[in-house]
Image: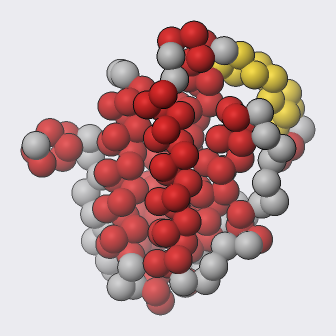
Amino acid sequence: MELKTFADYSTSAQTRLYEFVLDKPDACAKKFETIGPCKSIRELLAHMIGAEEAWCARIQGNELPPRYEGRAPEDISAIFADWRAQRGITQSAVDNASPAELARSVHVRLLSINAEIDLTIEQMLFQIFNHENFHRGQCSMLLQMQGIDPPFFDYTLEFLRR
């Protein structure tokens, strides 16, 4: 699948999630026992933004910013505003990358798992969207655990909306 198509789908699905949870602050704040570090929808949303921000810093050759999770606002609408700003940076990387840029390799240190790997810019952008997909599924599950029917994120919905 073309990266731009995947990016567009991911942006659309994430926007649906954010718009859906804006009026559900209690559902976003509710803590759950999990084996992962993110214990709420709000924490998952902040984690997704933080990961996207870090991957974009790597793509741009910048130092990693301080972890977003530690500086994320409590308010979901403010988190959403931060995500839209970050997504603009990510979308620009997708839209402006030449084939040579997408093929450029970057050596990456993954501090969370103490590993190093060489990835192309295309792989790094794919990671952003795939990571978001994974955690969006977790958000859906946490909504369902509270008796809330989450938005429909199936890719085919994009075709039905056109």
Q: How is the image coloured?
A: secondary structure
**Residue 113 visible, this orientation:** no
Foreground pick, 141 / 136: 136
Locate residue 20, reporting x and y percent: 32, 72
Q: Residue at x 48, y 49 (%)?
A: 88
Locate residue 137, reporting x and y percent: 44, 54
Q: Residue at x 65, y 41 (%)?
A: 56
In the displayed structure, would residue 86 be above or below residue 129?
below
Foreground pick, 106 / 109: 106
Task: Name the quarter where the C terminus is drawn.
Answer: top left
Tally of numbered tags: 0
Foreground pick, 141 / 49: 49
In the displayed structure, would residue 130 be above or below residue 53?
above
Q: Is residue 124 left or right of residue 97?
A: right
Q: Is residue 73 left or right of residue 58?
A: left
**Residue 60 visible, this orientation:** yes
Residue occupying the far right of the picture:
114
Residue occupying the far bottom of the picture:
26
Task: Name the quarter where the N terminus is drawn.
Answer: top left
Foreground pick, 39 / 155: 155
Locate residue 71, reporting x and y percent: 73, 72
Q: Residue at x 14, y 39 (%)?
A: 159
In the displayed structure, would residue 156 be above or below residue 106?
below
Q: Is residue 149 left or right of residue 86?
A: left
Q: Residue at x 77, y 33 (%)?
A: 61
Locate residue 93, reporting x and y percent: 53, 34
Which picture quadrant has residue 79? Answer: bottom right
